[in-house]
Image: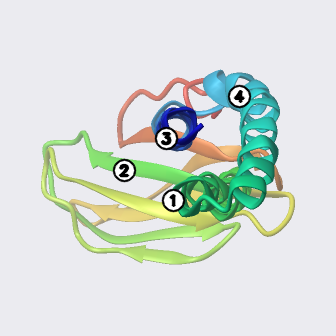
Amino acid sequence: MEDTNRKFARGMRAVALGTFLIGTALLTAYYFIGDKVLMVGYTYLVVALFVDVPFALIGLSDAIRYRDRTLLLSVGMLLLNIPAMLFYVWFAFMLMDTARITFSNSTESELTGIQLSGCSNYVIEPLQPGEEETVWVRIPHDCSLDLLYVIDGDTVEENVCGYLTNGMGAAMDYRIGGQNDSDEYVR
């Protein structure tokens, strides 16, 4: 029976590591890609629960029955996925209430006095032509984002995003002084 328990313990550790790595990969993909992987993540969460919970229950039962410390440690490793999953869900919800915008200077001149207003107020350091800076904006309620900057002595105002709301989350590239596609920011 000891050989069977060791194989099962190795199997539980493999399941624990596999579900952790897949969950981490999905969170990373959500961070960089956005909503396109959200349904895959939700589906994976349910599948992982249906895989991990039976392994944990069987492993715990066998660990108690055979007083097997190796099985118990493997169950503990499997159960460590729970706090990791809770953190990943919290982080995903935080991203849903955040707009991540990379501003790039697409002009031939230095931009100064760069201010972002609307959902939150931010001051961006001067940008040389071709330079960029990423800003994380918390979306506290329904709001829009406007940009004010000085170029060659003239003050210019641009609308970055006309409407954001909680749970909408956005990841976008915004070319200051350039052509921007209004649909590119939707997460």
State the separation of the CA atoms marked 1 and 4: 39 Å
Is residue 54 visible in the rendered image? The answer is yes
The type of residue carrying mark 2 is Phe
Marker count (numbered): 4
Q: Residue at the far front: name it.
A: 1
Identify the disc placed on residue 44.
Answer: 4
Q: Disc 3 marks which residue?
A: 6
Which badge, 2 or 4, is on the more N-terminal residue? 4
Q: Is mark 3 on a helix, strand or loop?
A: helix
Left or right: where 35 falls relative to 100: right
> Foreground residue, 95 or 64?
64
Q: What element carries label 2?
A: strand
Which badge, 3 or 1, is on the more N-terminal residue? 3
In the image, which is nearer the foreground, mark 3 or mark 2? 3
Q: Disc 2 marks which residue?
A: 103
Q: Is mark 4 on a helix, strand or loop?
A: helix
State the separation of the CA atoms marked 3 and 1: 61 Å
The type of residue carrying mark 4 is Tyr
* Residue at left offset 36%, top offset 33%: 178
